[in-house]
Image: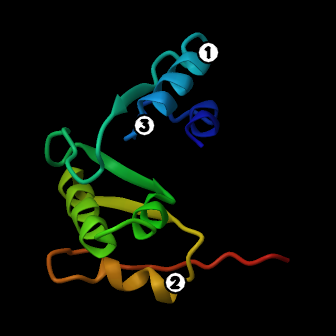
Amino acid sequence: MCEEMYDCGFTQIWNMDISSVCIEQMRTRNKDRRSSLKWDVMDCRDLKYPSETFDLVIDKSTIDALLCGSCAYMNVGMMMKECQRVLKTGGYYVAVSYGVPENREFHFMRAHLKFELRTYKLSKQ
């Protein structure tokens, strides 16, 4: 996804994943053509970025992965709190999920979060 965004003109993109293998593969694949992409190995529950850093955070099925593990709700809550912390005031959090909205939306409405929720459901045509 970051490659397509970069090619459309969004060149200030930070990419992070807990997998060093994933990050190294992506870094290697993009080092010549998309050299300004940034790559970080990091746990989404403990982001090392300063508060209010990003205009946009895109969750590309990370919520789905966390919900498949142990302590799922706690881990999702920690991730969302961290994502909210690194978002600038007025920034956007976009979650791409294979889960149905009814199984995801309440995670955005927890007491420790202040998201304004809008849900868009895509369906096959």
Label number found at residue 19: 3
> Which quadrant is the C terminus positioned in?
bottom right
Q: Quadrant of residue 70?
A: bottom left
**Would residue 55 be found to the left or right of residue 50 on screen?**
right
Q: Quadrant of the N terminus?
A: top right
Circle 1 crowding by C-alpha within 10 Å: few under 14, some 14–19, many from 20? few
Q: Which mark is residue 33?
A: 1
| Amino acid at the residue labelled 1 | Arg
Numbered disc 2: secondary structure: helix
Res 47 → quadrant: top left
Disc 2 residue type (three-letter): Pro
Q: Earlier in the sequence, mark 1 or mark 2?
A: 1
- The answer to whether residue 11 is visible is no
Residue neighbourhood size for the residue with mark 3, other residues' Cα within 10 Å, grouped as few (<14), some (14–19), many (≥20): few
Contact, CB < 8 Å: mark 1 with mark 2? no
Q: Is residue 30 left or right of residue 81?
A: right
For the residues marked 3 and 1, what is the alpha-carbon distance in whole angstroms? 22 Å
- Of residues 21 and 15, the one nearer the viewer is 21
